[in-house]
Structures are given as structure tokens and as C-alpha cells.
Amino acid sequence: MKILLTGGGTGGHIIPLLAVVSEMKIIETERNIKKTEFLFIGPRSDFNKSISDAGIEIKIVYAGKLRRYFSLENFTDIFKTLLGLIQSLYFVYKFKPNIVFSKGGFASIPPVFAAWILKVPVITHESDTIPGLANRMIAKLAKKVLVSFYFSKKYFSEKKVILTGNPIREEILKGDKKKAQELFDLKENMPTILVFGGSQGARKINEVITKSLPQILERFQVIHLCGKSNHKEVEIEVKKMKLKKIYRYRLYPFLSDELKDAFALCDVIVSRAGANSLFEIVALEKPSIIIPLASAASNHQVENAEFFQERKMLSIINEEALNENILAEKLFELFDENNIKNEMIEEMKEYNNFIGQKPIDNIISEILDYCDPITDIKK
């Protein structure tokens, strides 16, 4: 079986694709299916190493972007997209996939359109409550549209849309708390906060968490993932502060294999509201303070977070209201009012029990509909 993967260059697109690849490898063994061949077609990005490390061949193609405001780049990007389509037609024809699995983003439009021209079936997955413009376009060419939220079904054709949930990385659930204490050199008996702003970091969260450190480090240990592009700036700012309890603070641009252990160690998470982050937090049953990105397209981060807040699984601080005092107060409240934290955990447990089958299993099931049961079984 051959599966072509495509998506934009952010973690929100790439991480779910890697989750699918990981699960397919497990299923190959369990069901005695021949080894699946994967090919990724997409943009050049920081995540390309993660893709190649998973044993997936990468083909870089051009892709434009359709902006919802006037820009001369809207005109030049038409030619980028056309060039990307020509490149994609060649790569798709040469690879001859059984199925294309797309995670959306404008970079996925050329390969999806190429697949449609060559009559290769396309499945696309939408993580957010409100789909992006690219996925709305791709959905018109797709055989199936998989969604993470029931709320999202109304944006797509009733005949195509299927509620599957959002795929999460299984390894995220396999962290070791004891190992994390040694790895990050942090104490066992002190509550730990994990702060991250998604795959690209978050400047506003970085600013506020840095300013709040004098208050927060009085009571907590902090693991702060600030994003690669922000790391130097945050590091310089923290050094300037000359904090007395700096030994309770760990700063990283990002974590890869160690992230699962950071999740296992932490008591509370401070995060943006990307769908992948939220679903991982809920799967881990970690109390959280969520700060949706106010400028996210179609306000989808706010909608994502509100879905879970309405079910009492997390607490939201609106970005416009965010400052160091409010963040510190919210954190202190979570630990001082145990009933709030405990209610979040119970609601997440209940939600996970209600979901039952893992979302990744639902998604793999839809992909395997395009697997030939005769030719793909090992002899």
C-alpha cells in the first residue's frame, strides 16, 4: 500500500501525519499487512527533519497562499501554486499512491489537486472547530472529510463528513515522571508548570510568563518551551531579571523525545489553543490554562478552547486581558482551590471514557478502506 501525505509546514499539520504513520506501522504487524510506503509532498519547514526521521521520503513543492486581504503577493502566489501543481503532478504520477491523506494548509492544495486530476482518492482531516479556507477548498475534491469536532460537520458535505476525533501521538502518553525529574533536574515534591505556545512558540505568552516569574517561582517549578525563533530573546530577558529562584526554571526552544516526560512531570499546562495541543492535554488529563491566539483565522483557537471550557476541562484567559498578574492569580487559584483542578481532571476522564475508541483508530480505518485486502496481505 502507498500513502501520500501532505499538509502545511506547522506542527498542527505535521504532528497528526506522524501519528498516522506511527499507528500504521503498528497495524502492519498486527494485521500482517505489507509494509506501507509513505511519501510526503509539502513545503520546506522546520519539521522536515521529523518527517525524514520517521522514514518518510520528502518532496518539496512550491505553494502560494490565499490571503483574505489585498496584497500583491496574492498575484505572485498564483504562479507559485501553478508551479507547485506541475511539480506535484510529476511526484504523484511517479509514486502512484492508493490514497492521499491531507491535513490541510495552503501547501497541500497543489498535491491534492494533482491527485484529483490523476484520479487518486483524497481524504482530508480538519482538526479545528472552524475549518481553514484551504481545507474548505480541499473538501470539494476529497472523497472523505474527517473532523475532530461534531460542531465542524456543518461546514462540509453531509455525504462526505465523518466525525473521527483528532489523532494524537501515542508516545505522548508514555512519559516517565521519575525520569523527567532527573532529566530536568527538578524536585519531586514541588508542583511543576509546563508552558508552551505550540510548535512555533508564542511571543505574548513568552513575555507574560517571563514577567510573572518572580511571583510564580516562589511556589512552582517551570519548564518553558518558548519556540526556536524566540529562544535567544527570552534567554536574555530572563538573565536580566537576576531571579533569586532561577534554579526552579528550565528554558528550551522546544522538546522532541523529552516532551512526553515533561508532560508526565507537570501538574498544570499553560498553552495556546491549537487543536493538537488541546486534544493531547485532554488525553493526558492535565489541568490547564489556555490562552487562545486572538489573531487566529476565523477565531478558531477561541472556538477550540471554548468547546472544552464549556465542559469544564480547562480554564481560558483571553489574550487581550492577559498580563503577568492575571496569569499568576489563575495559577495560584488552580492550586489553592483543589476542587477546580480536580473537576477538570474528572471531566477529562469522563470525556475520554465517552470517546472510547481512539481517534487514530477511526482515521486509520477510513484510510484502510482504500487498501486492497488481497495484494496488501503478506504472502
Image (cartoon, rainbow, N blue to C red):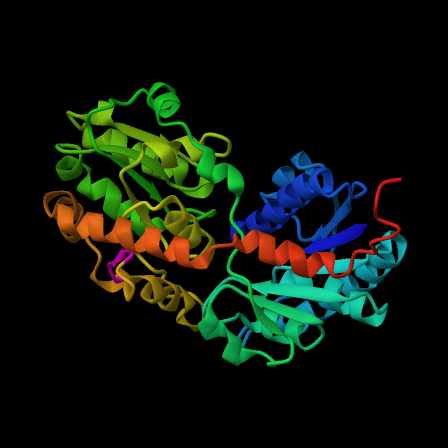
Magenta span of residues: 313-318
Residue 58: percent from the left, percent from the top?
74, 45
In the picture as drawn, the residue positioned furthest to the left comes out as 336
Q: Residue at x 84, y 55 (%)?
A: 91
Residue 237: percent from the left, percent from the top?
28, 36
Residue 8 in view, yes or no: no
Closest to the observer: 120 or 212? 120
Residue 86 falls in image quadrant: bottom right
Q: Residue at x 53, y 49 (%)?
A: 11
Question: Is residue 1 one of those drawn in magenta?
Answer: no
Say whether residue 184 is left or right of residue 152: left
Residue 320 falls in image quadrant: bottom left
Q: Main secondary structure of the magenta part?
A: loop
Residue 95 lies, with reference to residue 254, above or below; the image says: below
Say whether residue 355 is left or right of residue 207: right
Residue 156: percent from the left, percent from the top?
58, 78
Q: Residue at x 69, y 38 (%)?
A: 52
Closest to the observer: 48 or 77? 48
Closest to the observer: 285 or 373? 373
Looking at the rendered structure, the number of numbered marks drawn on it comes to 0
Closest to the observer: 31 or 94? 31
Residue 211 in view, yes or no: yes
Residue 77: percent from the left, percent from the top?
67, 68
Question: Is residue 315 one of those drawn in magenta?
Answer: yes
Q: Residue at x 89, y 40 (%)?
A: 379
Residue 147 lies, with reference to residue 26, above or below; the image says: below
Say whether residue 82 is left or right of residue 44: right
